[in-house]
Image (cartoon, helix red, strand yellow):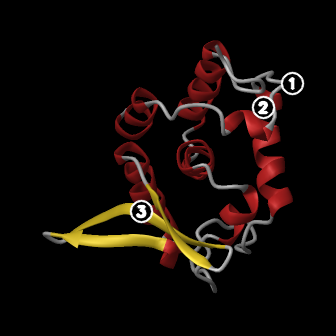
């Protein structure tokens, strides 16, 4: 039984098809983190590159955890392997931008994203693919699908 407010398989397929066609790494990262790591919008807007627990194994970048502060305590959130690939791709894109800050996500004006900015971005996607009844919370109820990420990154 599907949880109330969760995207159906068909709706999820529509969303992943759109993201693959659009090829926007920032949208993939936002939806990937919201669905896989299940951060809230506030945590997502405050996320910095330094929050990514980066390990270098044989000169290779790895991001196995995202470290955030909740209620005064540091919390390690596990990053799935496929989301790690999206993070790597996004950080490659991000390093070519001249940014005056360490925030992971930024707007077209190179300012850190706000909650409303991320919400508007996701709402625009939902409208474009005709998911009128879907909400931001419905993203958090979906399972991050490996085939979508592999398709996005390697096709």
Per the image, label 3 sits on a secondary structure element best described as strand
Q: Is 48 left or right of 93, judged from the image as shown?
A: right
Q: Is 58 left or right of 81, judged from the image as shown?
A: left
Within 10 Å of the Cα at label 3, are there few (<14), some (14-19), or many (20+) other Cα atoms?
A: some
Point out the image quarter for the N terminus.
top right
Q: Residue furthest bottom?
A: 100
Q: In terms of sequence position, does the residue under pointer 3 or pointer 2 come before the other?
A: 3
Within 10 Å of the Cα at label 2, are there few (<14), some (14-19), or many (20+) other Cα atoms?
A: many
Using the rendered view, name the quadrant where residue 39 is placed. Answer: bottom right
Taking depth in this image into account, of 104 and 96 the one nearest to the observer is 104
Q: Residue furthest left?
A: 58
Q: Distance between the residues labelled 3 and 2?
A: 28 Å
Taking depth in this image into account, of 135 and 30 the one nearest to the observer is 135
Name the residue tied to disc 3. Answer: 65
Marks 3 and 2: which is nearer the front?
Answer: 3
Q: Residue at x 65, y 33 (%)?
A: 141
Q: Residue at x 42, y 53 (%)?
A: 79
Using the rendered view, name the quadrant where residue 11 is placed. Answer: top right
User: From what the image shows, is residue 143 above or below residue 105?
Assistant: above
Contact check, label 2 and label 1, Cβ < 8 Å: yes
Q: In terms of sequence position, does the residue under pointer 3 or pointer 1 come before the other?
A: 3
Residue 146: give x, y in percent of width and height: 40, 32
Name the residue tied to disc 2. Answer: 126
Name the residue tied to disc 1. Answer: 132
Q: How far apart are marks 3 and 1 (CA)?
A: 33 Å
């Amino acid at each position: 039984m599907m949880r109330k407010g969760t995207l159906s398989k068909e709706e999820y397929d529509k969303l992943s098809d759109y993201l693959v066609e659009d090829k926007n790494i920032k949208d993939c990262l936002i939806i990937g983190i919201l669905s896989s790591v299940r951060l809230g919008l506030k945590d997502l807007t405050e996320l910095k590159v330094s929050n990514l627990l980066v390990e270098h194994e044989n000169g290779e970048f790895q991001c196995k955890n995202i470290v955030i502060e909740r209620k005064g305590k540091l919390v390690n959130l596990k990053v799935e392997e496929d989301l790690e690939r999206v993070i790597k791709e996004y950080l490659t894109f991000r390093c070519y931008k001249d940014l005056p800050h360490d925030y992971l996500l930024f707007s077209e004006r190179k300012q850190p994203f706000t909650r409303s900015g991320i919400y508007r971005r996701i709402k625009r996607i939902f409208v474009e693919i005709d998911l009128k009844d879907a909400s931001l919370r419905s993203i958090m109820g979906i399972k991050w699908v490996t085939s979508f990420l592999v398709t996005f990154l390697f096709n």
